[in-house]
Image (cartoon, rainbow, N blue to C red):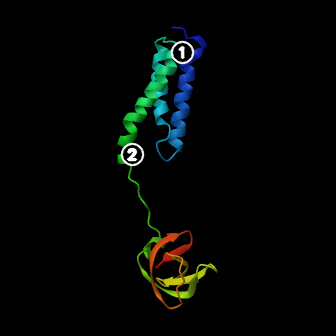
Amino acid sequence: MSFPIAYPIIWLIILVVTLVVEALTAGLVIIWFSVGALAALVASYFGIGFIYQIIIFIIASSLALLITRPLVKNKIIKTHVKTNADLVLGQKGVVVEAINPIEGKGQVKVGGKVWSAKSVDSSNIEKDEFVTIEKIEGVHLIVK
């Protein structure tokens, strides 16, 4: 069987490249194009015209995406690895340097460590007041 312009080679190269890229990424990124390239490779083997091979590639890739993406998205467990910083959320702390949003100053001691802090509502909080850590934004605790 002769193939004009070696279409099977083109689809094989696309298949290999998409599989390699997929293997190098952390999530499902282009695996659907691998399915499409495989379908187009099979079509080229049977002598189907190149335009139809492209259509088969697009349809197979789209179907693979539509069918598998929702299933895989539900199965992938999105884990959040807790850090030591996360342990202070919800904890009580004491203001060791008055929180002043205008000057951009303020520190809170919680769990034996001193953190830069901002108030939730951009209000001033005086030294030695107790606060609750609501969230962390960058290197600042957001307290109330």
Q: Residue 27, labelled with which disc? A: none
Instruction: Relative to 76, say whether 93 is above or below.
Output: below
Sequence-first disc among 1 and 2: 1
Which residue lies under the disc numbered 2?
Answer: 73
Instruction: Relative to 141, say whether 82 is above or below.
Output: above
Name which residue lies at 49% across and 47% down.
26
Residue 35 place in picture, x, y as percent: 45, 29
Residue 47 place in picture, x, y as percent: 49, 11
Q: Secondary structure at mark 2?
A: helix
Residue 19 place in picture, x, y as percent: 51, 35
Name which residue lies at 39% across and 49% down.
76
Q: Secondary structure at mark 1?
A: helix
Which residue lies under the disc numbered 1?
Answer: 50
Instruction: Relative to 116, say whether 61 is above or below.
Output: above
* CA distance separating discs 1 and 2: 33 Å
Residue 63 place in picture, x, y as percent: 41, 30
Identify the residue at the far right of this view.
Answer: 103
Name which residue lies at 50% across and 37% down.
30
Tally the numbered discs: 2
Instruction: Relative to 74, say whether 13 is above or below.
Output: above
Identify the residue at the far bottom of this view.
Answer: 128
Circle 1: is it few (<14), some (14-19), or many (20+) Cα within 10 Å?
some
Q: As shown in the figure, which amino acid type bears the numbered disc 2?
A: Lys
* Nearer-the-camera pick, 143 or 83: 143
Q: As shown in the figure, which amino acid type bears the numbered disc 1?
A: Phe
Query: Pointers 1 and 2 in contact (CB under 8 A)?
Result: no
Circle 2: is it few (<14), some (14-19), or many (20+) Cα within 10 Å?
few
